[in-house]
Amino acid sequence: MAGLSALDFSLGLVGLLIIRQLLRRKPLAPSPPGPKPWPLLGNLLDMPSAKEWHVFTDWGTKWGDLVSVTVFGQKMVIVNSVEVATELLEKRGSIYSDRPVMEMGGEMVGWKNTLVLVPYGDRFRSYRKLFHQLIGSNASMSQFYPIEEAETHKFLQRLLSTPQDLAKHVRKTAGAIILRISHGYEVKETDDPFVTLADEATEQFSLSTAPGGFLVNLIPAWTGFKRTAQQWANTLNEMIDSPHQFVKEQMAAGVAPPSFTANLLAEPDLTPEKEFDIKWSSGSLYSGGADTTVSAIYAFFKAMALYPEVAAAAQAEIDSVIGPDRLPSFSDRNDLPYVNALALEVLRWHSVTPTGVPHVVMEDDTYGGYLIPKGTMVIANVWNMLHDPRSYSDPMSFNPSRFLGSNPEQDPRQICFGFGRRICPGRVLAEASSSFHAP
């Protein structure tokens, strides 16, 4: 035992010496500035537990547009300006387009198969191609405009009937639109199983990918959540498989309406691998769009309550252009500049994803004399960019007029949907869904 203990001591000493030497090596460039880290913990105690975008904004005021922190050795860089985000995430997108490994949500539950967390590579490119093919432009998206309009009309009827259930109606309508587009499925008026399942799965996604919610996301060796992970994996797989199987049954019976899934499954040379990509990319469409659309529509109603003069101006434009005898349609959008500006202001004023989803740099890089090492998580503080007084006058106020006239302020769609190769591929659908509800 004594010999073994001496050997352990010697090996430990050698290890410490090696680590000491490695730490003494000077990097090619310094890290970006930021709060001073503690030994081993890094900046764990500095990390906010809620509304992190406000803390990141404060850090930006103190240390600049590029702020560096570490947590248990994981390096993170916070980007606080559009200019830096564009340079890194778009112009250098070939090395800034990976995603972090989320042990709980991604690996154990299985969200790594959805677009939001799929690693940068062939599967990611396949998903992007499928999205672009069917909903990547206004022209391709136009085939689904009748669905948007029909479901919005149902929403208005429900709202007139029971206005006290506004939140319920908004969530139901967002789910109904996306499920009809993704799978050609019309939701039931009450207790729809697909909507319930999707709401449950997306809530679990939020919990399983929050760094503070599960230590396994920070320390991969942690194994205390395997039972929960298995239960949540079952929910996710059911959310993905059930509507996909519904479409296949409808197609076999010859009654499947056009949808993202049906259109792609009907293509020749369908392989098991391509069907896997279709199934998970279609599931990504729902899981990625339902909550964000709901949040944007909630923000619209909140803004109209807080700024009645904006609501009155929008209503006056609709009354003037549309008249009292019909509801607006997508064909009217070009004739409603103020309403379009109002929809843009909703996207700017209320950041649906205030810090986006982290990118991961795939090789060492330098910017502004600072080193951004391979494996660094890069977080775009979207909220700060959309409330930056350098870009938006009086940014905390709700003012659609900022996007009108000969010198409009920056289009928030260039920011709120992300950057580079990881920009939201469903942004045309998201923008259509949010803006069509706004009038």
Image (cartoon, rainbow, N blue to C red):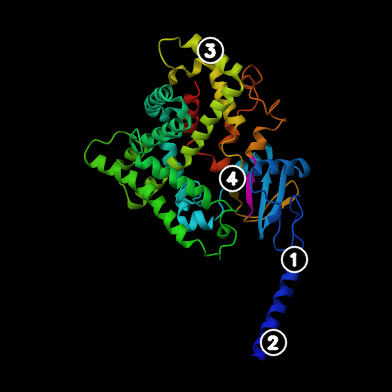
Residue 137 placement (x, y as % from top left): 46, 31
Instruction: Inspect the image, locate mark 4, and give the three-letter code of the amino acid beneath it.
Output: Gly
Query: Would residue 45 be visible to someone looking at this image?
Result: yes
Instruction: Inspect the image, locate mark 1, and give the three-letter code of the amino acid beneath it.
Output: Leu
Residue 130 placement (x, y as % from top left): 41, 41
* CA–CA distance in space, label 2 to label 1: 26 Å
* CA–CA distance in space, label 3 to label 2: 84 Å
Q: What span is colored magenta in the figure?
A: 376-381
Residue 93's label in the rendered image is: 4
* CA–CA distance in space, label 1 to label 4: 30 Å
Residue on which disc 2 sits: 6
Residue 317's label in the rendered image is: 3
* CA–CA distance in space, label 2 to label 4: 51 Å
Indicate whether residue 379 is drawn in magenta: yes
Density class for disc 4 (Cα within 10 Å; few <14, some 14-19, many ≥20) is some
Instruction: Inspect the image, locate mark 3, and give the three-letter code of the amino acid beneath it.
Output: Glu
- Mark 1 and 3 residues: CB-CB less than 8 Å, in contact? no
Q: Check the image and report above or below for 346 versus 41.
A: above
First in sequence: mark 2 or mark 1?
2
Disc 1 vs disc 3: which is toward the camera? 3
Predominant SS of the magenta segment: strand
First in sequence: mark 1 or mark 4?
1
Q: Nearer the viewer, residue 79 or 439?
A: 439
Disc 3 vs disc 4: which is toward the camera? 3
- Mark 2 and 1 residues: CB-CB less than 8 Å, in contact? no
SS under mark 4: loop
